[in-house]
């Protein structure tokens, strides 16, 4: 289980507001993750998911560039 902690202003850096639409089923799953205490907010959950996705892609890009 991931426990949240407030980031200081220095750790947050520059933030950009992004709006998007998702299926209701996914939204309900996100709400459940917040209600059960895994995340403090949906925003925190989305930021964490994006961090993981970017990390995964960056590893893939690094492996691809080594092959060239």
Image (cartoon, rainbow, N blue to C red):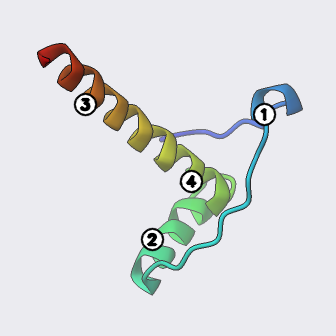
Q: Earlier in the sequence, mark 1 or mark 2?
A: 1
Say which residue label 1 marks. 13
Is 51 on the left or on the right of 18, as rendered? left
Q: Earlier in the sequence, mark 1 or mark 4?
A: 1
Query: What number is the disc on residue 45?
Result: 4
Q: Residue reaching furthest right?
A: 9
| Mark 1: secondary structure | loop
Which numbered disc, 2 or 4, marks the residue closer to the eye? Answer: 4
Looking at this view, is 67 or 39 the one in front?
67
Q: Residues within 10 Å of mark 3 (few under 14, many from 20)?
A: few
Q: Position of residue 37 (x, y in %)?
A: 60, 54
Q: Earlier in the sequence, mark 3 or mark 2?
A: 2
Say which residue label 3 marks. 60
Residue 25 position by quadrant: bottom left
Q: Earlier in the sequence, mark 2 or mark 4?
A: 2
Query: Gap in Å between the C-alphas at discs 3 and 4?
Result: 23 Å
Q: Earlier in the sequence, mark 3 or mark 4?
A: 4
Query: What number is the disc on residue 29?
Result: 2
| Mark 3: secondary structure | helix
Q: Are marks 3 and 2 in contact (CB under 8 Å)?
A: no
Looking at this view, is 39 or 37 the one in front?
39
| Mark 4: secondary structure | helix
What residue do we see at 39% from left, 43% from top? 53
What residue do we see at 77% from left, 35% from top? 12
């Amino acid at each position: 289980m991931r426990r949240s902690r407030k980031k200081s202003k220095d750790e947050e850096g520059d933030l950009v507001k992004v709006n998007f639409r998702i299926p209701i089923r996914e939204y309900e799953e996100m709400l459940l993750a917040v209600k059960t205490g895994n995340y403090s907010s949906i925003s925190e959950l989305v930021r964490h998911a994006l961090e993981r996705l970017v990390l995964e892609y960056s590893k893939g890009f690094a492996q691809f560039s080594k092959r060239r």
